Image: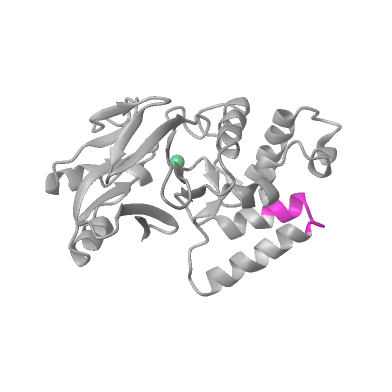
């Protein structure tokens, strides 16, 4: 049984730490800062056995060197000149074992060119660590890639099993859903989700993970081929990828 826990950091980051039930060995995804990770390991009497990185932004890799001064562990990550501490460079289709779990690597460029995700089948739901690409209710900004790249990356994630639990790196959900509501003001499924997520946030419960099935119904960036959404952009956009580019551009200004 895989146990996955958020370590809250900065204003809205989640570093995901995971381990097998009963094990004292843990793996960390995207440790942007070492201190909260070291605290968590010490408080729970755990040692670190691997670091997994999704992309080169500093709030995802900033704690790696300090963690390596405490633990001599492999650092998995994409091929990227900005992440020299990666010891095991990964590409599409590679499979790694971390904390006795087998993860398949997906290349998902767009937010950055080097962005990858980690996908695992587990005893319960499939699990995905997707950094800053797919967010609950939204998607990451396109800093380095093109809208086509980002659209294709999101489509790759959208094609995973609907019960895939995905763990993104930020608590952006309510802001994302406020935007989703601007895109689809009459959508009752979306309204119900907003209410559910607001109740969680009122109790300081993370809205992450979400699952792919929920996103297919309520995340505007995965709904670009739905007529109710595309008709808003028909004058400017016809193809789903053009609808995506238009929605992303609107969100950048929202
Ligand atoms: Zn990022």
Give the camera-side residue of 24 and 143: 24
The location of residue 169, given as percent across then percent down, is 44, 49
* Quadrant assignment for the N terminus: bottom left
Q: Quadrant of residue 249?
A: top right
The location of residue 121, given as percent across then percent down, is 43, 43
Q: Where in the image, quadrant-wise, is ligand 1 located?
A: top left
57 horizontally vs 62: left or right: right
Residue drawn at x 66%, y 48% is: 219
The location of residue 212, given as percent across then percent down, is 58, 47
60 horizontally vs 194: left or right: left
- Asked whether the viewer can see residue 64, the reply is yes
Residue 186 is one of the magenta-drawn residues: yes
Give the camera-side residue of 69 and 94: 94
Q: Which region shows up in magenta?
A: 179-187
The location of residue 236, given as percent across then percent down, is 81, 30
Residue 92 is one of the magenta-drawn residues: no
- Asked whether the viewer can see residue 31, the reply is no
Residue drawn at x 22%, y 56% is: 23
Q: Quadrant of residue 86?
A: top left
Residue drawn at x 27%, y 59% is: 36
Residue 80 position (above or below residue 48): above
100 horizontally vs 166: left or right: left
């Amino acid at each position: 049984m895989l146990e996955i826990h958020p370590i809250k950091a900065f204003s809205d980051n989640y570093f995901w730490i995971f381990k097998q039930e009963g094990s004292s060995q843990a793996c960390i995804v995207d440790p942007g800062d070492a201190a909260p990770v070291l605290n968590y390991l010490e408080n729970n009497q755990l040692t670190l056995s691997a670091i997994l990185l999704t992309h080169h932004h500093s709030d995802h890799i900033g704690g790696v060197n300090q963690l390596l001064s405490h633990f001599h562990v492999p650092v998995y990550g994409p091929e990227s000149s900005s992440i020299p501490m990666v010891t095991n460079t990964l590409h599409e289709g590679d499979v790694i074992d971390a904390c006795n779990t087998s993860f398949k690597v997906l290349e998902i460029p767009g937010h950055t060119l080097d962005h990858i995700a980690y996908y695992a089948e587990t005893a319960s739901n499939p699990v995905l660590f997707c950094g800053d690409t797919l967010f609950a209710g939204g998607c990451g900004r396109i800093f380095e890639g093109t809208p086509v790249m980002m659209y294709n990356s999101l489509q790759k994630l959208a094609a995973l099993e609907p019960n895939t639990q995905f763990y993104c790196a930020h608590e952006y959900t309510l802001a994302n859903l406020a935007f989703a509501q601007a895109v689809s003001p009459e959508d009752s499924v979306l309204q119900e989700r907003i209410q559910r997520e607001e109740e969680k946030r009122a109790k300081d419960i993370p809205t992450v993970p979400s699952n792919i099935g929920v996103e297919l119904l309520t995340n505007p960036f995965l709904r670009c081929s739905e007529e109710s959404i595309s008709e808003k952009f028909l004058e400017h956009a016809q193809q789903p990828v053009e609808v995506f580019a238009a929605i992303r551009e609107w969100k950048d200004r929202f």
